[in-house]
Image (spheres, helix red, strand yellow):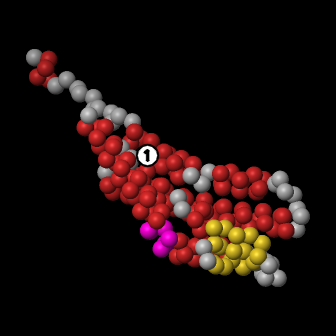
Amino acid sequence: MRLISRLGLLTLVGILILSLWSMVVWPSLAHGYAQILISVLQPLMTNGTELRLEANAINVYDSHGTAIVRKNLSSLNEFGLLLALFLAAPIMPFLQRTRRLLVALGIQTLLHILEIALLIWIAYEFYFGINRHSFAYWLLNLLMAGNLIFPILIWALLTWRSWLPTPQPIRRPTKEAHL
């Protein structure tokens, strides 16, 4: 009974965190996060391609100033889900939970960088009329479809051991037990 009430409380707190994150925290952090993504990706751009943060999107411009692709900032909001999931993880020390959450946030950020890089690559393939069914196109669709699945997979991979029962130490008989 106590476990059910604790899970119910964690679920309620997780939903509250997810709601607050989406409505309050993410809108104030989104532009700073987008600037970080742009600063990482801009040195990789070639042929005068430029990334710009405009309104609530990252826009990619070619060397002629033509916008070729747009990535909305609202589609980069999986961090609240990761936070709620790590809060709901079973018994795990706070420091260990925090370290794993930071690793998960790093992995999710790398997935965002990969997604935007692939989006630019695909945009150029469409722009120049190159193969529309390349590996990059398939991979981009996988990343975009997995926007809400990948945080759950990351969380499951980083916390799976905490779901298992802890092994009990083997008791060895003492000398007194044989007497």
The answer to whether residue 12 is seen in the rendering is yes
Q: Residue at x 69, y 77 (%)?
A: 51
Magenta extent: 24-29
* The quarter of the displayed image where residue 98 is located: bottom left
Residue on which disc 1 sits = 159
Q: Quadrant of the C terminus?
A: top left
Left or right of 75? Residue 166 is: left
Check the image and report above or below for 10 versus 118: above
Total marks shown come to 1
Check the image and report above or below for 92 versus 111: above
Q: Residue 95 appears at what percent x and percent y?
A: 33, 57
The answer to whether residue 101 is seen in the rendering is no
Q: Residue at x 44, y 68 (%)?
A: 25
Q: Residue at x 48, y 55 (%)?
A: 81
- Extreme residue in the top direction: 179
* The quarter of the displayed image where residue 90 is located: top left
Check the image and report above or below for 129 versus 54: above
Left or right of 63? Residue 167 is: left
Q: Residue 18 appears at what percent x and percent y?
A: 44, 57
Left or right of 102? Residue 66 is: right
For the residue carrying disc 1, how many other residues have a C-alpha within 10 Å: few (<14), some (14-19), or many (20+)?
A: many
Q: Quadrant of the N terminus?
A: top left
What's under tag 1, amino acid-wise? Thr
Q: Residue 160 appears at what percent x and percent y?
A: 45, 42
Q: Residue 9 appears at what percent x and percent y?
A: 31, 47
Q: Of residues 134 and 80, which is closer to you in this image?
A: 80
Q: Of residues 56 and 31, which is closer to you in this image?
A: 56
